[in-house]
Image (cartoon, rainbow, N blue to C red):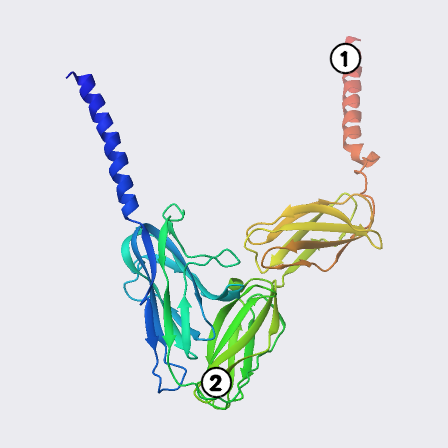
Amino acid sequence: MNSRNILLTILVLMLFLNAFPINIIKGQEVAQVSVEPSNQSVGQPSLPLPTPPFSINITVGSVHDLSAWEILLYYNLTVLTYDSTALPSGHVFDGKQFFQAPLVTGSDSKGNYLLLGAVLLSGTTFSGSGTLCQIKFIGYTGGTSSLKLDIVADQGFHTNLLNSTQNEIHPINIANGQVTVLGSQTPKQPSSITINVDQSSVPLGSNVTVSGDINVTRAGLTVTIYYRASGGATWSELTRASTDANGHYFYPWNTTQNYGITLHELKASWLGDVDYGGAESNTVTVSVNKRTSTISLSAQPGNVTAGSGVTISVAVAPKPVRPPEITISYRLAGGNWAILQTLTTDIDGARTFTWTTSTRGSYELKASWSGDEDYAGAESSISTVEVTGEAPPPDQPGIMDYLPYIVAAVAIVAAIGVAIYFLKFKKR
């Protein structure tokens, strides 16, 4: 066999090995997401409800190149109540740099759900099997609740895994679970809970005190506060607070950029205890607005002659993230405003330029900017410049300015005359 035939044989063999065995491996290694344990009972028939918190794990198996995951879990809210979420020691991203998305609790036409996830920020991806997260519930009433991962929410959320190229790992097998709650359902006294805010409209970054009362005067009751954009489809947990001995709770909410500049709705709830049933509060609203800003303008000197320069300085405070665009407007007193100049400030939000005046009059100047995603726009106070008249023409030379030249010329002429006189006298 010559060298050309050997090369062709090797190429064909490489293509065969790269195609056939890999397809078999891919077919055998379908990733799986499971609820574990798949079936469990909590509580005891002789003990009153609710049960103590219990855990389920969401696990993944036979996954390759995992860089992000999202879990959508539907459950029966009349049987179970969500308690907490954790990424336990040894979870799939443990020891790596990652971001854990805030938990979202919601409901739609298909039921009540939890939505949570995590994404790797750097480092190697995960391959193999392990735990994605751990979720704790409380058995609230007797009955059975399914735990379903294979439903697509009305908003399009679904359980999925992403690889390092941010593509869905497909296909994946999903194994759902269920929980049976046991316990005695004794009649409970009704309860109520309220919620209030000390401010209904605040600039971004301000504190809003969220407070309220449970009509059960007992310390240590857990209150969950939820928030959402006004009219939004889902509620997210803001925080959990505890009551004092009078059943009062409060929380100082700092309205950072994480929550967005919008109208927010807030509500509170508690689960109840062995004596009292749970309750949900009324809804209150808080408008989180852009931060206020100021802009200043100064014009110096304030009294000039026509044709002279005026130094105009502008500054925006607080210093924006990006240099803002400023509009300088002017008018003759009592007239209509016109744009003198539009300019971009330096990185400190300040700028200085020279305005060359033209005609006399009393001029008013102001500066404005339209704001950005964090700060509302602002307009400066008015500065006045008096242009008092036309600039005087250059000084014209007078007769006295020419006197030295005249004296010199007379002296020269006299000297010439004397010289001529003596020449003539000599010739005689």
In x, y percent, where is residue 5? 19, 18
Q: Secondary structure at mark 2?
A: loop
On screen, 67 above or below 23? below
* Quarter holding residue 411: top right
Quadrant position of the N terminus in the picture: top left
Instruction: Name which of mark 2 and mark 1 comes first in the sequence.
Output: 2
* Quarter holding residue 23: top left
Q: Residue at x 70, y 54 (%)?
A: 367
Label of residue 243 in the image: 2
Observer-nearest of 113 and 362: 113
* Quarter holding residue 255: bottom right
In x, y percent, where is residue 241? 47, 79
Instruction: Give the residue pinned by disc 1.
Output: 423
Q: Tell me if 42 is positioned left or right of 265 in this view.
A: left
On screen, 91 above or below 3? below
The three-letter amino acid code for the residue at tag 1 is Leu
Taking the image as drawn, is residue 355 in sight?
Answer: yes
Q: Residue at x 49, y 71 (%)?
A: 238
User: How many residues crowd mark 1 within 10 Å: few (<14), some (14–19), many (20+)?
Assistant: few
On screen, 365 above or below 209? above
Q: Tell me if 377 is positioned left or right of 333 in this view.
A: left
Residue reaching furthest top?
A: 427
The three-letter amino acid code for the residue at tag 2 is Thr
